[in-house]
Amino acid sequence: MQHLPDSDPVDEDGFHRGRVQAVRDYGGDFDWGGVFVIEDLDGYWEYLTHPAHAHTDRIGMPLVEKYDSSDITDDDPQLGAKIADLHRRRYESDPELAALVGMLP
């Protein structure tokens, strides 16, 4: 298991930063996974729309053989709808990305 350095929720550039951990999926259906701890929906939106994330999506999605994603919270029963809205906004603003996501297995 690899643990990347923790950082403050908001760094000196004003970006919300969370904790990231790469995990190996021994005995499961995947080889690798990632765990992202993001403070709030504003931080999640920054993560979703960050140029590095968009770049990773464009080079990584065509290589994906199997994909799964989940969001976990302990304090907001409406979080699923709020996250779905962020993704909807992101895909509406980026048709190329929406097409890539539509091709995921």
Image (cartoon, rainbow, N blue to C red):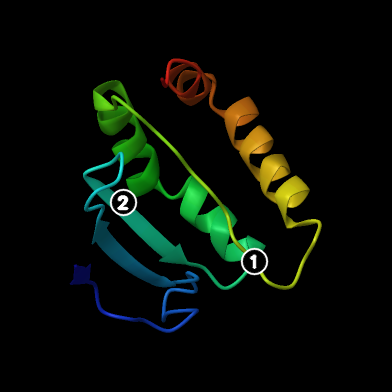
Mark 1 vs mark 2: which is more N-terminal?
2
Residue 2 location, x and y as percent? 18, 68
Q: Amino acid at mark 1?
A: Thr
Which quadrant is home to the N terminus? bottom left
The answer to which of 102 and 96 lies nearer the viewer is 102
How many neighbours does mark 1 have within 10 angstroms: few (below 14), some (14-19), or many (20 or more)?
A: few
Res. 58 image quadrant: top left
Question: Which residue position is annotated with label 1?
Answer: 73
The amino acid marked with disc number 2 is Gly
In this view, the residue in front, 9 or 79, is 79
As drawn, 76 above or below 64: below
Give how far apart the Cα atoms at labels 1 and 2 are.
Answer: 18 Å
Residue shown at the point (67%, 33%) measured from the top left: 88
At horizontal 44% and vertical 38% (from top left) the residue drawn is 68
Residue 102 picture location, percent across and down: 50, 17
The quarter of the picture where the C terminus appears is top left
Q: Residue at x 74, y 73 (%)?
A: 75
Residue with the mark numbered 2: 33
**What kind of element bears circle 2?**
strand
